[in-house]
Structures are given as structure tokens and as C-alpha cells.
Amino acid sequence: MKYDYSSIGFYTFDCLGRPVTEIPPGGDTYFIKELTMAVSGAAGAAAVVAAKYGLKVLAVGGLGDDLMGDWVRRRLEQFDIDTSMMQLCKDAGTSSSIVTTRPDGQRPALHMKGATGAFEIDDACVDQVLDAKVVHLGGTGLMERMDGPRSFALMKEAKRRGRITTLDVFAASKVDMHKVAGLLPHTDYFIPSIEEARALSGLQDKEEIGRYFNDLGVGCTVMTMGADGAYYHHADGTRFHMPAFNIDVVCTCGCGDAFNAGFATGLIRGLDPEETTRFAQASSALNASGLGSQAGIIDYANTIAFIEARSAGTITRAIAS
């Protein structure tokens, strides 16, 4: 296959500042310590992290004909990411965010949806888009032209071709479930946040949520849980809770996206489920150590060294029921 990782979906330009405690009243100005730009989004940040880990990456999404789109494309190409499947959507601006990072690392944002909702993958592009060991769909819920039957068919074809499929979402309520349910029978690894998983399922307990998604056809659900780590729930009965690493948090923007890329890297490198989840958790932790998506991630060797140097606590294994 030509690529290791095909990252499809939500690409956004982020301008991030910290620390922000409040918005100035009227036309006043408050001073902050840091300001940066980053490629973010459930597909964009994952693509950059995967490239940092040495994977051959194809970026698939939409950009506007504007300065932000030009910057995103150039930034992706700086990491040797193939941008030939990034579509220019002339009637939409590049998806963009102003991220106001709080002192505790939380990052309320102002977001313009833009080209993420305007791109679509036609039949002529399918062979290239699916020519990867891992096919990742990131941002379901934001991709207006792709959400629903188009994405269902794409992931079904990916599975038919024997690809490993991963899924992340931008879905905040039960009403979004119809955009997700059709993907799950074709998804090997569903990687939502615990908040997204609860919103979609209407359930609270992580094991009940895992069973719920298994019953809908997904191979494995891996829920990211912030400071509480991650929970792995496979249809084959393998279940465990992976604790988080103890770090000083700078910014949580892109942590779940870094987890996605770290998880894919573990799969491609043949790591076992616990090693893969640990590597993904370390990727998320390193991401949180800098301002903006991927800021704290250097390369594969550095992340391995981070894991070896720090204890993340004891893995809790669940008994299949």
C-alpha cells in the first residue's frame, strides 16, 4: 500500500493564546504570554502526529481559498504529508478556530465550520483514499456532505479491502447517533471521548457503553477520559482501564486527536492492545504539554522514552461479561 495512514475529515486552522481568563470588555486589551498557530481537528491533528511518528500519511479533507487554507496546506507538507486529496472548496472558508486556552489547560473556542462541511469524496478518488493500512475517519458530525450514506459506503469499502478502520466523532447528543450508527459495523476501533460516548449512547457506565457499541457492530471501543486515562473495550472480551500520565497540563487542544494517531502507530508497529493504548495515552499527554495540537510531540523515539521514564500507574483489567 502507498500509505500507512489515510486521515479523512476535519481539518482546521487554529490560532491559540494562553493564559486567557476572560474576554476584555468593550474595546479593551488584555495581555497574554503565548500565541501560536496549529493544524488541528480530528483528522488534521491526527495526520500531523502520525507523520511525526514516521508514518506515510495522506490528508483528505477540505480547505477554503484563503490565507488559512494556504497555511494549513503548507504546514501539512512541512511534515511530508501528501495533500493531493485536500480539496479546494471555493464557496467556503477554511475551518478555523480562535482558541482561548485557560490556565488549567481547558480551551473554549470560537469556531467557523467552513470547508469541513463542503468537501466530498467522489468515486474517482476512492482508490487513493483507501490505499492505506489504517483508514481514519475523524470529525463525523461536522462533515455535512460526507456524513451519512457517503461515509457509510466509504468505510464499508475500506473494510471490504481489508483495511484497519478507526473512527472519531464530533457529536454532542443522541440526535447525532444516526450519523454514527451506520459506520460502526465497518469500524475496527471507535475512539470517542467519554463525554461523546455518553452523549451518543445515553448511558453513563463505561462498560455498559462498551457493550452498547459492540452490539451495534463495532470491533472495539476505546474511550478517552482526560485525567482519568482511557478505557479499552473489545468485542473479543479484552477490557482494561489505562491510567493517565501525571503531567503539567499546558493545553488540552488536540489531545484526543493525538491519541488517535498514537493508537494507529501502535497498530501499524504491531504493539499489543495494552502497549498500543499506553503509547496513545503517552501521545495525548505529550500533546497536552505544549500550546496547540502536537506541540509537545517530537517523534516516536521521544514518546517511547517518555513512557519508559514515567509511571502511568496500574492497568485495571475488567472481566468480560
Image: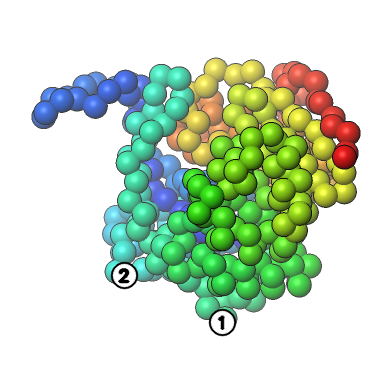
Q: Is 181 displayed left or right of 73 in the figure?
A: right
x%, y% of residue 276? 77, 40
The residue sitting at 36% across, 38% down in the picture is 109
Q: Which is more N-terminal, label 1 or label 2?
A: 2
The residue sitting at 82% across, 37% down in the picture is 239
Q: Which mark is residue 90?
A: 2
- Examine the rendered structure and indicate whether residue 192 appears above or below residue 142: above
Q: Is the residue under label 1 in contact with that under label 2 (CB below 8 Å)?
A: no
Q: Which mark is residue 124?
A: 1
Query: Residue placed farthest to the front in the image?
Result: 202
Query: Residue placed farthest to the bottom in the image?
Result: 124
Q: Is 218 displayed left or right of 292 in the figure?
A: right
- Examine the rendered structure and indicate whether residue 226 appears above or below residue 233: above
Q: Amino acid at mark 2?
A: Lys
Whether residue 187 is visible = no
Q: Amino acid at mark 1?
A: Ala
In the image, 185 versus 291, the foreground residue is 185
Q: Which mark is residue 215?
A: none
- Dot 2: element: loop
x%, y% of residue 236? 87, 48
The residue sitting at 65% across, 46% down in the picture is 191
- Choose top left, top right, bottom left or bottom right for residue 260: top right
x%, y% of residue 104? 45, 20
- Choose top left, top right, bottom left or bottom right for residue 229: top right
Whether residue 72 is visible = yes
The residue sitting at 69% across, 34% down in the picture is 205
x%, y% of residue 112? 33, 51
Query: Residue placed farthest to the left in the image?
Result: 27
- Dot 1: element: helix
Q: Is 113 displayed left or right of 49 in the figure?
A: left
Task: Tell me how far mark 2 sits from mark 1, CA to CA.
Answer: 20 Å
